[in-house]
Image (cartoon, grey):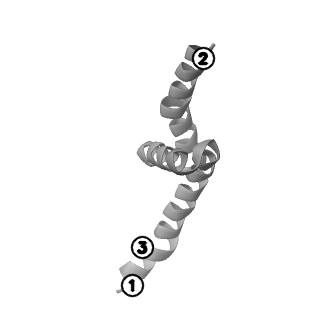
């Protein structure tokens, strides 16, 4: 059961979750994987779950706030 669980986590973390998040919040798959790994490393399972929305919000702030300000300069 433990081996099945490890295989499932790997498949879900590297294949399923990036594709779902890419379509749901339009976040690149590489960013989803990196954010989940960083969040999981820093705060465990809860950090991995929180990291993807945080990465999406940072990406949104960069696209909507920072980039337009840079284009005005």
For label 3, the SS is: helix
At 60% from the left edge and 20% from the top edge, which residue is drawn? 5
At 60% from the left edge and 17% from the top edge, which residue is drawn? 2
Indicate which disc, 2 or 1, sits on the residue closer to the N terminus.
Answer: 2
**Disc count in the image?**
3
If the image is split into quadrants, where does the N terminus sit?
A: top right
Circle number at residue 39? none
Indicate which disc, 3 or 1, sits on the residue closer to the N terminus.
Answer: 3
Indicate which disc, 3 or 2, sits on the residue closer to the N terminus.
Answer: 2
Circle number at residue 72? 1
Percent x, y for residue 43?
58, 50
Does 27 sit above or below residue 67? above
Is 25 positioned to the left or the right of 14 in the image?
A: right
Circle number at residue 67? 3
At 56% from the left edge and 43% from the top edge, which residue is drawn? 21
Foreground: 44 or 8?
44
Does 28 sit above or below residue 67? above
Foreground: 21 or 50?
50
Of badges 3 and 2, the one in the foreground is 2
For label 1, the SS is: helix
Q: On the image, numbered disc 2 is attached to which residue?
A: 2
């Amino acid at each position: 059961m433990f081996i099945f669980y490890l295989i499932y986590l790997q498949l879900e973390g590297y294949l399923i979750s990036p594709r779902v998040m890419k379509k749901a919040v339009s976040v690149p798959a590489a960013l989803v994987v990196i954010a989940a790994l960083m969040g999981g490393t820093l705060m465990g399972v809860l950090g991995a779950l929180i990291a993807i929305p945080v990465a999406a919000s940072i990406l949104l702030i960069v696209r909507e706030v920072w980039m337009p300000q840079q284009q005005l300069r």
